Amino acid sequence: MASLEELPLLPVFDGVKLAALATVLYVIVRSLHLKSSPAPPQVTYQDTPLNRFLFKSCQILTQEYIPPLLWGKSGHIQTVLYGKMGRVATPKPCGVRNFLPMEDGATMTFDIFEALGDHSTQDDITMVICPGIGNHSEKQYIRTFVDHSQRKGYRCAVLNHLGALPDIELTSPRMFTYGCTWEFAAMVSYIKREFPQTLMAVVGFSLGGNIVCKFLGERHSNQERVLCCVSVCQGYSVLRAQETFLHWDQCRRLYNFLLASKMKKIILTHRASLFCTKSSRLDDADLNRLRAATSLMQIDDTIMRKFHDYHSLKEYYETESCVQYMHNISVPLLLVNASDDPLVHPSLLAIPRTLADKKANVLFVLTQHGGHLGFFEGAVLFPQPLTWIDKLIVSYTDTLCQWGRQKHQTPHDGHKLRSAQ
């Protein structure tokens, strides 16, 4: 039985526990943004006939994006779940792997997945896909998107970044970089030769978004037979993005370290091909500096810029960024980002917003939630197998095909489709 001296302490102790519980709940509500209401994406665009048709027919652009209630409003959780767990009930589409020799001795690979049915407009369209950093066709988010596209009548071609597949050896002392478009260009040329009637919907995820936008903007001929381009969760300026990666806000420095560890693992997997060969630009000193690196900038300065003989890190970042090429793109261009993406600093979003303000062919779509390549949808706890971004890309491309049919253009004439705006 408690003494008289102890009795007054019990309410005080209970009050401390209650205050602690209230604090924990407050932190949970704030960090998970549980009070945030679902909202349609913010879209920056110009008033054109095509854009009016898009908003009428591509209804996902005007509908609320609803992430899972308990965790889907946290960009960190969306990003981590995507990175560690991938997608839910991931399909395993069957494709054919192709090997193409490059002029410098490298061997690039890409996979082709045929459509599982006819397209709704009977058009022959190929989704030409460039994955994110160090990714390939076997990644879960790529497999989910490919399966969904196949079922909607699209052929898919997926680039495997040079060096990303651990079981395929490099045949030259070079691997993928932020903005090297050589391998993607080779895949596009192959598709044009093998499927002369097809139009291409070019899709890039994260780093892949930088590559596809840079590729299209490098020369006008690259846009021939391109129906549209979609870029998801890229940062647009490699130089500015890497500078923000050195800051601790939104844990970017931690993400920087994790991505650097991933890059280090990929490079070390191919160290026999990359270091100390007769044609290599790398030596044992570079290998030692790589092992000590803790950031992407250190790896880029030690290793990545040397693949293409850049004299400085600044030159490498500026030349490999799509920001100086995007204004040359004339095909319909959809740029998608999430406000809570912890890898893309909010200041970088001024680039696509300004571009959409200036160019009639550009739509900039910004969701409130989604993280980096997450965009999970669901009710309370469990996400759906298909994500919001999977549905958006296919719906956007479907709508452009319908627009072409409505204007009575032949499906093989990309120039007429573009001029219809």
Image (tube, helix red, strand yellow):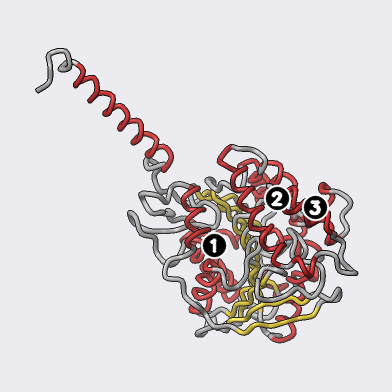
Q: Position of residue 301 (x, y in %)?
A: 80, 50
Tag of residue 302: 3
Q: Closer to the N terminus: mark 1 or mark 3?
A: 1
Q: Amino acid at mark 3?
A: Thr
Q: Alpha-carbon distance for marks 1 and 2?
A: 39 Å
Q: Position of residue 263 (x, y in %)?
A: 68, 58
Q: What residue does disc 2 label?
A: 296
Relative height, residue 226 to residue 40 (above, below): below
- Left-right relation of 276 to 93: right
Relative height, residue 58 to residue 2 (above, below): below
Q: Alpha-carbon distance for marks 3 and 2?
A: 10 Å
Q: Closer to the N terminus: mark 3 or mark 2?
A: 2
- Left-right relation of 163 to 21: right
Q: Amino acid at mark 1?
A: Leu
Front residue (pair 404, 195): 195
Q: Amino acid at mark 2?
A: Leu
Q: Position of residue 46 (x, y in %)?
A: 62, 52
